[in-house]
Amino acid sequence: MLNCLVVDDEPIARNLLDKYISKAPGIHLAGAIDNGLEVIPFLAKENIDLMFLDINMPQFTGIELLKALRNPPHVIITTAYAEYGAESYDYEVIDYLLKPFSFERFLLAIQKVFDLTQRHTIKYPEVIHLKANNIIYKVPIPSIRFIAAFGNYIKVHTTDRMLVVRKPLAQMEKELNRHIVRVHKSYLVMPEYIERLYAKKIVLKDKTELPLGATFKKMLEDRLK
């Protein structure tokens, strides 16, 4: 579990991060601070793995704080100002989130932290159990190609079958989490099966074509890098 600290002078920004953190697996909000000057004593007494840091704060900016910290935790910048991006990376920040950012973009950022540390305790199963036609199937996660919304159900397309499961698409997205990526409001796709990416669609290795929503394109491009 990653213990994280939010440092932002805007209540709306702190509340949004609180909401995102509460929804994400493997991450815990240990504190929220509205003043950069309070961060150093807080870090001295608390074990913090990740800090979400605003830049434009009164009295003590995020950049000034980064300069002052000798052994900072992992840092993800959260700001409305794009011009600080290059300078912030001089301090080895993990990611730079421009406000307002989506939950999907937030998840991509924290996944980068998970990839860099072995201190988290999330264990992702290699199989998932799905109930279709009153039968429970043990489905290997790597065999899932894509998942489509289907009313109150979802269609899970694997390499050898298609299962119609009574479950919301959003719940399936959370269960598979790091394995899968949303490409459209109605579709989840395993990145390993994507062959080509176009402006408004993706093509899988078996030539299946799926729509690509503009909201999700940037996140998918980052995932495929």
Image (spheres, rainbow, N blue to C red):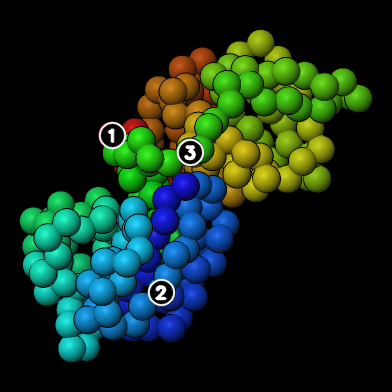
Can residue 199 be seen in this snapshot? no
Tell me the tag on residue 32: 2
Disc with the residue nearer the chain's start (1 vs 2) = 2
Q: Secondary structure at mark 2?
A: strand
Q: Is residue 88 above or below residue 173?
A: below
Q: Quadrant of the C terminus?
A: top left
Q: Residue beneath label 1, please?
A: 225
Mark-to-mark CA distance, 3 and 1 = 25 Å
Mark-to-mark CA distance, 2 and 3 = 23 Å
Marker count (numbered): 3
Kindly identify the residue that appears in the image at 57 percent across and 21 percent down: 126
| Amino acid beneath label 3 | Thr
Disc with the residue nearer the chain's start (2 vs 3) = 2
Mark closer to the observer (3, 1): 3
Q: Residue beneath label 3, please?
A: 121
Q: Is residue 55 above or below residue 11?
A: above
